[in-house]
Amino acid sequence: MSQLHPNLDIDQANQDLQGKTPEQIVEWALTQAKNPIITTNFRPYESAILHLVAKQRPDITVLWVDSGYNTDATYQFANKVIRDLNLNVITYIPKQTAAHRDVTMEGIPGIDNPLHDEFTDQVKLEPFRRALNELKPDVWFNAIRKDQTEFRQGLDVLSLSKDGVLKVAPLFEKTDADLDVYLEENSLPNEFDYFDPTKVEEHRECGLHTQL
């Protein structure tokens, strides 16, 4: 229950959505939304969630928090997907430049470095908090999947952010193999040359879905 969705029984809604297709989940979630957003970092398989949601809501706000540490391939992939799907992208960036951080933090702090939490807050969490505060969404589509991290295995298709925003993961039950089929069927690109400086390790949470 949240102030944004006072009449929503999230446990019942998750039960009702069991066995539904990603398209049906998106369709249901849009009925709950006055101001939906979709977040992306243009990591592998992101074109699937962007295509899935944008085909039902072409003008949806797409929030991209660009850490400034993406690979050349990721930026090229992002440009292509934004152009091909005609996405309405709003980009948020950290308040500090990577150059400034390279001096004050001596590059990207490792996960054992006491500065790593501050680094993560600067390049990801603060821009996200700022974006959510300014955009004021009531529904937040995201691409998290159950098989990605141990933490996510305990989640469900629907969850609430700490601010009461309804978080919707239409691809929650899908695997890489499932998404390979979706990308092929819809002639969508993919890009594996991706780097997230806040995660460091593939199956580690960066804090976005644990803290927000």
Image (cartoon, rainbow, N blue to C red):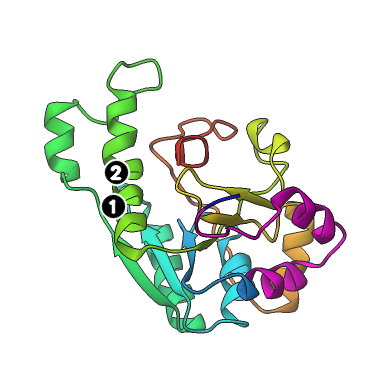
Q: Nearer the viewer, residue 126 or 178?
A: 126
Counting other residues with Cα less than 10 Å from the Cα at mark 2, is it few (<14), some (14-19), or many (20 or more)? some
Q: In the rendered image, which residue does mark 2 sit on?
A: 126
Secondary structure under tag 1 reads: helix
Give coordinates of residue 156: x percent, y percent. 72, 46
Q: Nearer the viewer, residue 146 or 137?
A: 137
Task: Judge left or right: residue 153 versus residue 39.
Answer: right
Q: Quadrant of the C terminus?
A: top left
Q: Nearer the viewer, residue 81 or 205?
A: 205
Which residue is located at x 38 percent, y 37 percent?
Answer: 197
| Residue 119 versus residue 175 in the image, above or below | above
Residue 16 drawn in magenta: yes
Q: Is residue 33 visible?
A: yes
User: Is mark 2 in CB contact (under 8 Å) with mark 1?
Assistant: yes
Secondary structure under tag 2 reads: helix
Which residue is located at x 40 percent, y 21 percent?
Answer: 111
Which residue is located at x 37 percent, y 56 percent?
Answer: 132
- Per the model, the C-alpha gap separating discs 2 and 1 is 6 Å
Q: Which residues are magenta?
A: 3-29
Residue 169 drawn in magenta: no
Q: Quadrant of residue 150?
A: top right
Give coordinates of residue 41: x percent, y percent. 45, 56
- How many numbered tags mark residues here? 2
Given the image, on which type of amino acid does mark 2 rest? Glu
Task: Judge left or right: residue 56 versus residue 67.
Answer: right
Q: In the rendered image, which residue does mark 1 sit on?
A: 130
Q: Work out which residue is located at the far right of the displayed protein and give it.
A: 19
